[in-house]
Image (cartoon, rainbow, N blue to C red):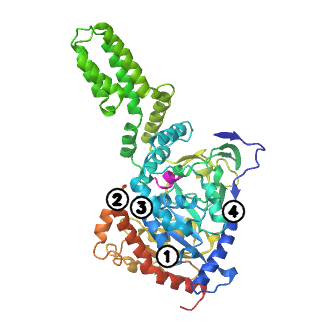
Amino acid sequence: METNVAGKGTIKVRISKSLSDGEEVAITARKKKVEKALTKLGMQCDSENIPNIAVLGAGGAMRAMIALYGTLVELKKYNLLDCIMYLGGVSGSTWCLPTLYKNEDWSEEIENLSNCQFENLVQGQWDVNKAMEAVLEATEDECYSLTDFWSYFLVHKLLRKFEEGKLSEHAGSCEGGKNPYPIYAAVNKQTYQNQNAGTWFEFTPHEVGIPGLGAYVDSKYFGSIFQNGQLIREKREKNICYLQGLWGSALGGEQEISKTISETDIKKLNMLYECYQTLLELQLLESTDNEGLDKLDHLENILKDFNSSKSYQLIREMQETWYSADEQRKKEEYMTLFQTLDTDFGDFTNDFHQKCFKMVKRTCLCLLNWSWGSINNFLYHCSDVEFPELTSDPIISLIDAGLTINTAYPSILRPERQVKLVLSFDFSAGDPFLTIKKAAEYCEAHAIPFPEIDENALQDLDSPSDCYIFRGEHTPTIIHCPLFNQINCPGEIAEYREQFSTFKLSYSVEEIEKLLIAAKKNVANVQQKILEEIKHIVGCPS
């Protein structure tokens, strides 16, 4: 859907480092909730000095999604969730958060909502027809990329849910102060390896933008066409399913996408063409020709994957009567088979096959070019931004932020957000300290206050502790919590890492429960330390 904008120039790119009006409203309302939560925990705090505390969920595919649910449930149990101002996610963690923000009361209902989600993961069904419909529609857009295919076919299939809602619709879940303010992230594919000021993109219910450049558009206009800072053509807002694929695209691989293409309804289309061709050849045969039975056998083989269809059953009957049937009966059976094929599979003709072939063609081209996250660039020819790496291209490519820093530090530590304490729950695979070391390097390069990281404290790669606290003068305090550690799974860290690999994409009830227990234990074991750090920044005696 596209609409020409009446009053050209009234909708513009916002060039400013300040927070959006919507975020300011949400934060003001949230401070009242945080103040009550701190009081409940025995901390009196002046309403003008409520500390901004952020929770960060790292990437890690399904492992991260499940672990973040467990983390939030446990934070709620210890009355800490209501102390949180910001909730940031990248990659797999973004597969958890948008589902919550559909519900304006999710902070109160987190345990029930998570149970429903896990039940759906195990028992739910994905809608292949909806996936095909969404991909075919996306194919018509000039910005079609592998992200569309990955989102609608593969992420949708993994999560057993097609999130049709829009990010801008989540504003109501934040503005009343009931829930932390959500922040998601992606990075510019062209610049993510050198991480310049135009690399990190952040997504909130109110705005999408580039904090390093101070350039933002309303979330509902992300993907619309802008030129020189003005909206030229409005396009339909991207749905959450697409965004979950964009934010969590690191797992996207050529093999998975190619395999999925081969399993789509293109298979039915090719099968139908082959049936028609064989049926025509069958009709041209002499009735006494033994080759006719071979043709029927070939038809049976073509339809072997659809052996419950009426067409397949009819072919089996024709095989049994081939030698006894006269010429007229065979012609009648050919016509009956043609009509039955049309009834069983005819909805794949008309213009459907044209759209399917276009989808396959464009997806294959995207595979050859490895095109991900193609989106209209709202900074195209924007004279207010001096950054030619971005302003010169009408289309940019955004990918999983976890490929750079596996936690959204660059967005959460945006100076305007004035975050005093970061609770970083690291669900990464491999080095449990890589994320915080990369964050420190990024912040140093971009003059963002960050505590000094003592490398000597980060040597236990194979047996990390459950909690590392980093403080500094005029910097936020960082509490870094590796998911698998010597406290919540002593002596079994390697086994947990192997069992819950990033590439593990399906979970049983027992596996979900085991992972949840580890994530919840992590919070339970460090909650007292979190409480002490909150008291420290509030200025209350321990």
Q: Give the residue at mark 2.
A: 508
Residue 329, magenta (yes or no): no
Where residue 541 sits, quadrant-wise, is: bottom right
Residue toward you, 296 or 455:
296
Residue 402 position in % (x across, y down): 46, 60
Q: Is residue 396 visible?
A: yes
Residue 367 position in % (x across, y down): 43, 41
Q: Secondary structure at mark 3?
A: loop
Q: Secondary structure at mark 1?
A: helix
Q: Residue at x 35, y 57 (%)?
A: 504
State the extent of the magenta-drawn residues as a range. Answer: 243-249
Eyeballing the image, is 266 above or below 318?
below
Q: Give the residue at mark 1.
A: 77
Callout 1: 10 Å neighbours few (<14), some, many (20+)? some
Q: Identity of the amino acid at label 3? A: Gly
Report the Cα–Cα distance between label 2 and label 1: 25 Å
Q: Which mark is residue 22?
A: 4
Report the Cα–Cα distance between label 3 and label 1: 24 Å
Asked whether disc 2 touches disc 3, contact meaning CB atoms under 8 Å apart, the reply is no
Secondary structure that dominates the magenta span: helix
- Please tell me which of labels 4 and 1 falls first in the chain: 4
Q: Give the residue at mark 3.
A: 60
Residue 524 position in % (x across, y down): 43, 78
Which one is closest to the eye, mark 2 or mark 3? Answer: 2
Residue 538 position in % (x across, y down): 60, 84
Report the Cα–Cα distance between label 4 and label 2: 40 Å
- Please tell me which of labels 4 and 2 falls first in the chain: 4
Asked whether disc 4 touches disc 2, contact meaning CB atoms under 8 Å apart, the reply is no
